[in-house]
Image (cartoon, coloured by chain):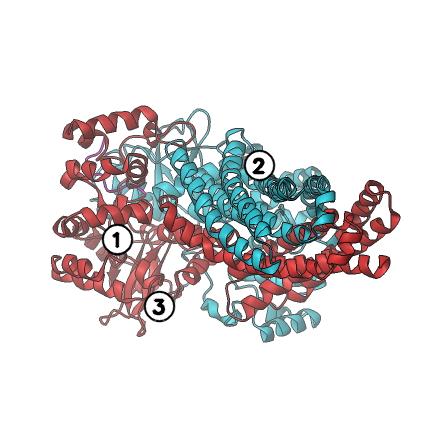
Chain colours: A red, B cyan
Amino acid sequence: MSEIDDDGLGRGAPEEPQADIYDEEGSIRHDFLTMVGAAIADRDVIFLRQNVAKLHESELGHLIEAIQPDQRLAMIRLLGADFDMTALTEVDEAIRMQIVDQMPNAQIAAAIGDLDSDDAVYILEDLEDEDREEILAQLPFTERVRLRRALDYPESSAGRRMQTEFVAVPPFWTVGQTIDYMRDEEDLPETFTQIFVIDPTFKLLGVVNLDRILRTKRQVKIETIMHETNHPIPAKMDQEEAAQLFEQYDLLSAAVVDENERLVGVLTIDDVVDVIQEEAEEDLLRLGGVGDEELSDSIAETSRSRVPWLAVNLLTAFLAASVISLFEATIQEIVALAVLMPIVAGMGGNAGSQTMTVTVRALATRNLDIHNAYRVVRREAGVGLLNGVVFGIMIGVIAGLWFQDVNIGGIIATAMLINMMAAAIAGILIPLALDRFGADPAVASSVFVTTVTDIIGFFAFLGLATWWFM
Amino acid sequence: MSEIDDDGLGRGAPEEPQADIYDEEGSIRHDFLTMVGAAIADRDVIFLRQNVAKLHESELGHLIEAIQPDQRLAMIRLLGADFDMTALTEVDEAIRMQIVDQMPNAQIAAAIGDLDSDDAVYILEDLEDEDREEILAQLPFTERVRLRRALDYPESSAGRRMQTEFVAVPPFWTVGQTIDYMRDEEDLPETFTQIFVIDPTFKLLGVVNLDRILRTKRQVKIETIMHETNHPIPAKMDQEEAAQLFEQYDLLSAAVVDENERLVGVLTIDDVVDVIQEEAEEDLLRLGGVGDEELSDSIAETSRSRVPWLAVNLLTAFLAASVISLFEATIQEIVALAVLMPIVAGMGGNAGSQTMTVTVRALATRNLDIHNAYRVVRREAGVGLLNGVVFGIMIGVIAGLWFQDVNIGGIIATAMLINMMAAAIAGILIPLALDRFGADPAVASSVFVTTVTDIIGFFAFLGLATWWFM
């Protein structure tokens, strides 16, 4: 119906409904993959242009990930100038690096010129310094200056994620002048939801949402409808902190300013959504003892990245084993203790993980701070006591019946209660302390917590048994 | 500078910079809390109106959570009509319920009339049926019909989260007519980024972004600039699925349609960001063995919600213990086995968690599907083998030296290798299988995985030792 293809809500939405290439599970349809594979093998450029080139960038990214590794570069070569480089921002880092490494720098430079600056930076920041400089040198002057400025900001800062294309007008313009300007100007961002008001030195004066402009009569001056505070984001602010501002104030976009409060770019919610996802994912992976690995990493890379966590846990495992070895004589006398001791340690570990997970999450979302820390610690201790009594009795009864010994039942029940309390307290105080000392609680908490629950679990159970029986 | 206070980027941004009430840690400043507390005690309505009433809804929400429970209702009463009910959508469910339970239904009805429909639904959906009906009955007819329609959609559906206020125009209008309509119409949504194009029966024909309207000459017809496919979201679609569409296609808002493709509302990115956060949080909490608990839950509630997970783990702990009890005779002979056996089981558990965490996350983000499942399973098996060899040798050497027995070293090394392989395979196949059978892999995987690593760890180590020594 329309010739215009850049008024999609994202950046160039597809003309066809998205359901096409996906099956019901959300995977790319098998027959589509087969057809694409055949087209690549047959060098069928027409099929690829008609069916692949017009995919949305994220669909194209999925497709690149789904086809065979050796087909990827072939497909990109066949598509030539029709290949939307933005798709590379949607694939795993390892795959992106493989592709970019094999593409000639001249081709990358040509493709990058068409991208929004934030997407261009996303691709450029992972390259070797040498390649990056070569590509930048081939770009037009203004483009190069813009990208270099963004690349100069620290990694994971708002300045790295911002888009340097924006609409800015002086405060004395009227709504009518502003609309006329937007009608005539060719070089506008692909899509935007607000315009910025600046002085001649680019100092940010305010913002106006587009709906406000559309509701206002032509003769009204921009300065009378602009809004002064739009949480301008310092370019050096960490992206996670910027994301929290977006979340808290339901922002769609926000001005990024330099040290002199001059407007240098705009951060948009679509990039922030990616940051929110990454941060949540990071916490989950770190709690599980894995770092920044991706599914496309090799066996050697994955193995290496998981070794440190396992090595630290090995140390603590030997620590726990040395506690057991203190009680070898008791175990030799009463083997039932060896059978039951992993239950005490393991249940403590599980209870500790529960508390720790809640604490790490609450710290990440800033729901836990000095105002409620005491209340929450008290609550966790209470939960530990209550569940310690419940499970102490349960385990005591079962163990007592199993080994036909009321003493063993009493000892394991007491040890269980002690360890559940220890688990609750360690589960909340360890992440709180790590956070206070500036460490990431998601990375280290679980090692410390299980060390505590293992050592206290074995010590309480075997120690009580030794004191009682020996 | 401006009298208009609803052109904020969110819904009514504050006039003052947000930094005011927070300290550097992101907690509410202590002196501000003290002043608010004193004002509540002194019934100082003027202070509260000047300093609390004009806070952003999320800041007001934080404040409500930070003050003493008995001050909350007092403050809301003192604020009276100046209290922004939207703040209640920003606080923990338990706190919201306490407040709403104590407010007269008439007051809730009056306050709810001013809210956007999505916020009103958010508060109404948690109420008792009786209270909800009483409040709905006090609302104007159109308002009541709108809210009831949203409430009729299933929980966690797009229909529940949508806003029923939107701007819709016929396709034959010109850009000029559309702008004039927006300038004259009083009853527009507080903020919006796109307008919808509908036929007389409200059937959705297309969407136009506001920036497209602003770039287009007045005489151009809307139908020539509208975009046909904007991923209309069926009202019954699960909110998580809708959120995935927003993420994939970088949407800012999307039309929500009923079974007949008639426009019933609009879903906006600020609500979707909350959904994304919730879903990521859910996975993390489930992997940690906790459900939908909140920091404000009581000890009894928390304890109760954590019991099921601990009870299941208790079962599996006894299962593992019964494996140990098969080898009581061997342990009595060689107590070193009791000392070392938790290392084998524990390291397997850690390696299994690593694989499982990666798998659960990849399934949630749909990065793992039939196209790469085989490749990823093979990779994990490889990683298990490699790390099994590395850690098998390490542990074997240490244990051999510790107990001065090369046999024990060889046995634990072999058991370790076996258990690391088992951990890798269980860590990926169990979540994959749960996902395939429609269960949530985040909930159940970790119990199954540690059961496998405990049982295989104890069985391999004690079994090998029995076979070798006895």
Q: Cα distance, mark 2 to mark 1?
A: 40 Å
Q: Which numbered dot is residue B155? A: 2
Residue B203: image x %, image y %? Answer: 39, 28
Q: Chain of mark 2?
A: B
Mark 2 surroundings: few (<14), some (14-19) or many (≥20) residues within 10 A:
some
Magenta span has B3? no
What amino acid does circle 3 point to? Lys
| C-alpha separation, residue under disc 3 versus residue under disc 2 | 41 Å
Name the amino acid type tagged 2: Glu
Which sits earlier in the primary sequence, circle 1 or circle 3?
A: 1
Kindly report which numbered mark, 1 or 3, lies closer to the viewer in this rendering.
1
Magenta span: helix, strand or loop, mainly?
loop
* Residue A190 image position (x, y, % from top left): 24, 48
Q: Which residue is mark 1?
A: A123
Which SS class for mark 2? loop
**Figure quadrant of the N terminus of chain A:** top left
Query: In the image, which is nearer the foreground, mark 2 or mark 1?
Result: 1
Outermost residue on the right side: it is A406
Q: Tell me which amino acid carries mark 1.
A: Ile
Work out whether residue A17 can be spotted.
yes
Q: Position of residue B293 (x, y in %)?
A: 64, 49
A237 or A185, which lies in front?
A: A237
Residue A236 disc label = 3
Determine the chain carrying the residue at label 3: A
Magenta stretch bounds: A1-9
Tell me which chain the residue with mark 1 is part of: A
Q: Quadrant of residue A423?
A: bottom right
Comparing marks 3 and 2, which lies closer to the viewer?
Answer: 3
In the image: residue A295, left or right of residue A112: right
Residue A296 is left or right of residue A343, and the answer is: left
Write the residue at 60% across / 60% down. Answer: B402
